[in-house]
Amino acid sequence: NSGMANSGVFNSGVLNTGVWNAGLLNTGIGNVGSYNSGGFNPGSVNTGSFNTGDTNTGWWNTGDLNTGVGNSGDLNTGGFNRGSQNNGFFWRADGQGQFGGDYTLTIPRIGLDLTVDIPLSIPITGSVGSVASNGFPYINVPSFTIPTLHLNGSALSGTIGPIVVDPIRVTGPSIALSIDGPLHLAVSGPGVGPVVVPVWHVGA
């Protein structure tokens, strides 16, 4: 060990445990970078082997913060992803293969329909009063007298009359009406809803 405070063989770095570690605080073999666990990592803080990027878990990752194999992008989980933030294999774009889902509670429309039957009974009574010819403002037929008629003939003789006609009086009819039957009212509105409640959503 040409370095300092190393445990192992041929470590040129500092505080390494293993073999041929040139970096700092490596555990493994042939780590050029620092804080690696594994072998032959030129990058730093990698877990695995042959990672040229930093903070990778796996092998041959040239990007950073990857979990898997051969990822040249960053923040990938899987293998051989050129893009970043992917889940799966061989993605070239970004943000592919993500898990997503949602659960939505839907309350259907509640209609506002109202029907009302109102029992209806309206009695109507009345009468047309008596019309007296001598009291009506437009018709006045007073009593009159037909004078005595004298009849004389060879076989018949006598008198007729006098004839007295009293005032003319008209008695009107009585009125009795009734309006019966239910009154039907129907009110229909647009209703309420539907109501959509998103319970949870996980974006892809």
Image: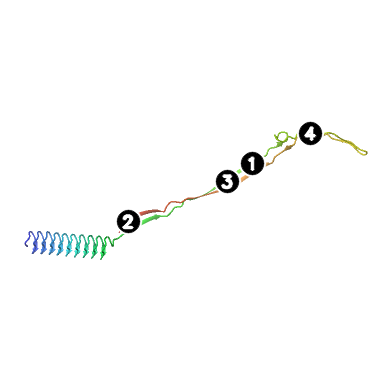
The disc placed on residue 120 is 3
Spatial distance from mark 3 to mark 1, Cα to Cα?
A: 16 Å
What residue is drawn where x is 62% and y is 42%?
A: 124
Residue 125 - label:
1
**What residue is pinned by disc 2?**
201
Q: How many marks?
A: 4
Q: Mark 1 or mark 3, which is nearer the start of the sequence?
A: 3
Real-space CA distance between mark 3 and mark 4, rounded to the nearest whole angstrom = 53 Å
- Residue beneath label 4, please? 144
Give the class, few, some or many, for how many residues have Cα within 10 Å of label 1's Cα (few <14, many ≥20): few
Say which of marks 2 and 4 sits in front: 4
Q: Amino acid at mark 3?
A: Leu
Q: Is residue 73 left or right of residue 134?
A: left
Q: Residue at x 38, y 54 (%)?
A: 196
Q: Position of residue 91 (x, y in %)?
A: 26, 64
**What whole-number distance in Å separates the C-alpha atoms at marks 2 and 4?**
107 Å
Give the mark nearest the N terminus, 1 or 4.
1
Which amino acid lies under the numbered mark 1 shown in the image of this protein? Thr
